[in-house]
């Protein structure tokens, strides 16, 4: 058995985004967000928090024009966190704001009492937009009190920077 160790990796992505309309919050997105967050009170899919909830597109909104919706649907049948894909069967996906493509995540999180702005959505070393899928999914299953990313260290360093700036 190997002992605990840290592995640091730097991820670089080169993504070719197709031409797309400017991002706006569509009526369908607002309706689905209201259903998930306000009516159904769905918590953050990773940590269960009901604070500062945001709604994430599983398949990126800006990539939608380049995606095959049949392949999206096939994937969403396998990853169906709220059961909507099962309920809706093979009804075509016509927009990235389809409820089957949405996941509720926290937009702010605390780890060991240290705030991590962006939480499991956009947080550094914590959010789905910031770390690889295998590590992000592991955050959902990590044992209490165990840290598997440097989210705390990053947040503490940011706090130190802010304190030193405010003291000058």
Image (spheres, rainbow, N blue to C red):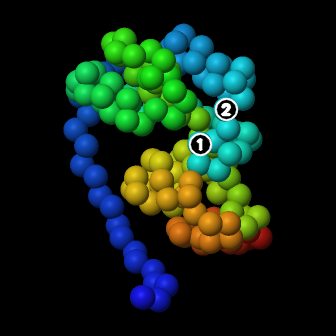
Q: What mark, if any, has residue 45 been given in the picture?
A: 1
Q: What mark, if any, has residue 42 been given in the picture?
A: 2
Q: Is residue 29 left or right of residue 39?
A: left
* Placement of 89 over or under 10, stated as above or below: above
Which image quarter: residue 48?
top right
Residue 22 coordinates in the image, percent (x, y): 39, 21
Assign a secondary structure to mark 1. Answer: loop
> Can residue 158 be seen?
no
Residue 131 coordinates in the image, percent (x, y): 43, 56
The C terminus - image quarter: bottom right
The answer to whether the residue labelled 2 contacts the one labelled 1, judged by CB atoms less than 8 Å apart, is: yes
The N terminus - image quarter: bottom left
Is 116 in front, or is 137?
137
Residue 29 coordinates in the image, percent (x, y): 53, 18
Give neighbour class at mark 2: few <14, some 14-19, many 20+ (Cα, 10 Å): some
At a point 40% along the width and 75% down the height, the residue shown is 8
């Amino acid at each position: 058995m190997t002992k605990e160790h840290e592995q640091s990796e730097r991820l670089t992505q080169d993504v070719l985004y197709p031409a797309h309309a400017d991002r706006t919050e569509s009526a369908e997105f607002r309706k689905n967000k209201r259903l998930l967050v306000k009516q159904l009170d769905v918590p953050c899919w990773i940590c269960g928090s009901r604070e500062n909830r945001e709604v994430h597109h599983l398949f990126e909104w800006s990539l939608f024009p380049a995606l095959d919706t049949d392949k999206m649907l096939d994937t969403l049948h396998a990853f169906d966190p709220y059961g909507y894909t099962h309920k809706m069967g093979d009804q075509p996906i016509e927009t990235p704001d389809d409820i089957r493509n949405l996941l509720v995540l926290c937009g702010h999180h605390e780890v060991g009492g240290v705030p991590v702005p962006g939480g499991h959505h956009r947080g550094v070393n914590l959010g789905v937009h910031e770390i690889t899928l295998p590590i992000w999914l592991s955050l959902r299953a990590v044992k209490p009190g165990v840290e598997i990313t440097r989210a705390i260290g990053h947040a503490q360093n940011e706090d130190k920077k802010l304190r030193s700036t405010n003291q000058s």
